[in-house]
Image (cartoon, coloured by chain):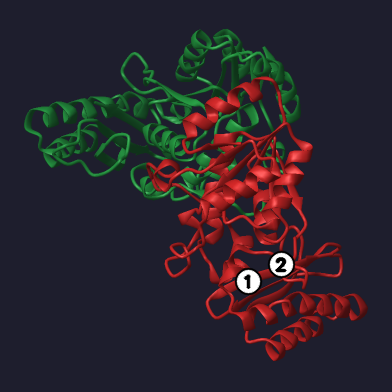
Chain colours: A red, B green
Amino acid sequence: MKVVTTIDELQQELEKYRTAKKKIALVPTMGYLHDGHLTLAKTARKDNDIVVMSDFVNPTQFGPNEDYESYPRDLKHDEKIATEAGVDYLFVPSVEEMYPTDGGIRFEAGPASKILCGASRPIHFNGVLQVVSKLFHIVQPTHAYFGQKDAQQLALIKMMVRDFNFPLTICSVPIVREEDGLAKSSRNVFLTAEERKQAPTIQKALQQAQKEFLQSHDKDKAIQIAKTMIESETSGKIDYLELRSYPDLQEIHPETRHFLLATAVYFSNVRLIDNILF
Amino acid sequence: MKVVTTIDELQQELEKYRTAKKKIALVPTMGYLHDGHLTLAKTARKDNDIVVMSDFVNPTQFGPNEDYESYPRDLKHDEKIATEAGVDYLFVPSVEEMYPTDGGIRFEAGPASKILCGASRPIHFNGVLQVVSKLFHIVQPTHAYFGQKDAQQLALIKMMVRDFNFPLTICSVPIVREEDGLAKSSRNVFLTAEERKQAPTIQKALQQAQKEFLQSHDKDKAIQIAKTMIESETSGKIDYLELRSYPDLQEIHPETRHFLLATAVYFSNVRLIDNILF
């Protein structure tokens, strides 16, 4: 595996594979890799000739009071995990390499970016689309891999690729969990021992809500069951817990066939997300 | 020359040239082609293997009270001009082909899009960047050609390509004029005979202002000279007449080396633009 820090070098490396019509996969990450990323990379490895993983904590998707500075970073660890997954190129640009100039142009991710996670993070998805579109142009992958854990991000990136005609395919990979059911996250390391013990309740609460909804079709009741469970069994504070249509993220209606049941819960300052697609 | 109406067909046609590493030029237009477009296409022809011209009146760059419906269209005429210029593919998609879905994601073209033409057309450049980025992804050109006449559009597209890492080169072509100096425009056909006679004053006024500024370095005096000339010698109403730095479109300061002197003038409902880069 080669670690590359500049756009020019990465493009020079990839040019020969593009000419040879190889399948090039991009796995965008913010680093501090865990088993979720590993699964993404292994899936990409299986189905492509070349795997590029980007490892970049993107400042433009963090709000002023969010955890950009304290977001965990460990490049040596990332190199080890990426090598193990069979990544060919680990792209680790600096902020200056990614954002040397700024003419003020932005993506406005629209109504579907203002709900769920976007309700409390108003510029988050604008920044996500900005960096992801840049990475798409830099790497020009044939396939790009995103985890289902960030379901709203996945939906918005699929929309962007569809509506802006990006010439690539978006592939998604199911949530990878700890043995007790907690969704893997780079932020899990910041939980206290007690919070870590409580956190698997998030998944159990979503499962209860799903079960209730499939039986009664009563959305409000289903959501209330999950909220009560999280509030009574953990110290977590619910940011949102919602049932939406997927992938368009609209309010559900009788014709809705694909559902996203998603939540974000704060444990102290650590914000955890989880969801079920059904 | 082949006229193509669907994205799929165009991409199938272009695939072989991409594989063979040919230089592919894109010349985006809204049709009703005049000598300005012809010059763009001929320049593209000279420097590339394949020339794709798009011919699409993009609804998303027109405001609700603008001339989208009445914008002139003449496909037969366009086919003739494009053939004459040596265009290989004339891409003429329908609105449904270009915008079959809408997840609500937009470009926000930023501060440099709110001045000059953008001051009276607040969503115009958002729509321009939307359609141009779509065309870049559909055609995947190595080079794209834009006229200097739309200087603010050219500057914003260059910014977008630079800041979002689009893998192509933007080429610009000088303004093409009628014999009396009026900049060629698809909208010129809507001028009355009297207005048409007065319209060349726009260029003369800009030339006077440039001369004054180069002598006195007095921006306000230079602009006033041009405004007075247009107001006293024509029935035109000035939308704006400004001197800015180029290509960043900021207020000028003592270190500014490249200038854009630009104006928009209404003759009845016809909005004409012109500029000098120096």
Disc 2 crowd, CA 10 A, few/some/many (<14, 14-19, 20+) = many
x, y percentage for residue A132? Answer: 57, 46
Which quarter of the figure is the N terminus of chain A placed in? Answer: top right
Q: Tell me which residue sits at (64%, 43%) in the image.
A: A83
Element assignment for label 1: strand
Give me the chain letter of mark 1. Answer: A
Placement of A152 over or under A103, stated as above or below: below
Name the residue beneath numbered marker 2.
A183
Residue B35 at x, y percent in the picture: 46, 16
Q: Specify the label residue A91 is tagged with.
A: none
Q: What residue type is labelled 2?
A: Ala
Q: Quarter of the image holding residue B22?
A: top right
From the image, tell me which residue sits under label 1. A272
Q: Which residue type does callout 1 highlight?
A: Leu
Q: Quadrant of the rendered structure where residue B259 is?
A: top left
Percent from the top left, x then y, of residue B29? 54, 27
Res. B64 in view: no
Residue furthest out toward the left: B216
The single residue placed furthest to the right in the displayed view is: A215
Examine the rendering and report whether any part of residue A125 can be seen. Answer: yes
Q: Position of residue A254 (x, y in %)?
A: 86, 70
Quadrant of the image containing the C terminus of chain A: bottom right
Disc 1 + disc 2, Cβ < 8 Å: yes
The image shows residue B1, relative to residue A152, as above or below, that is above
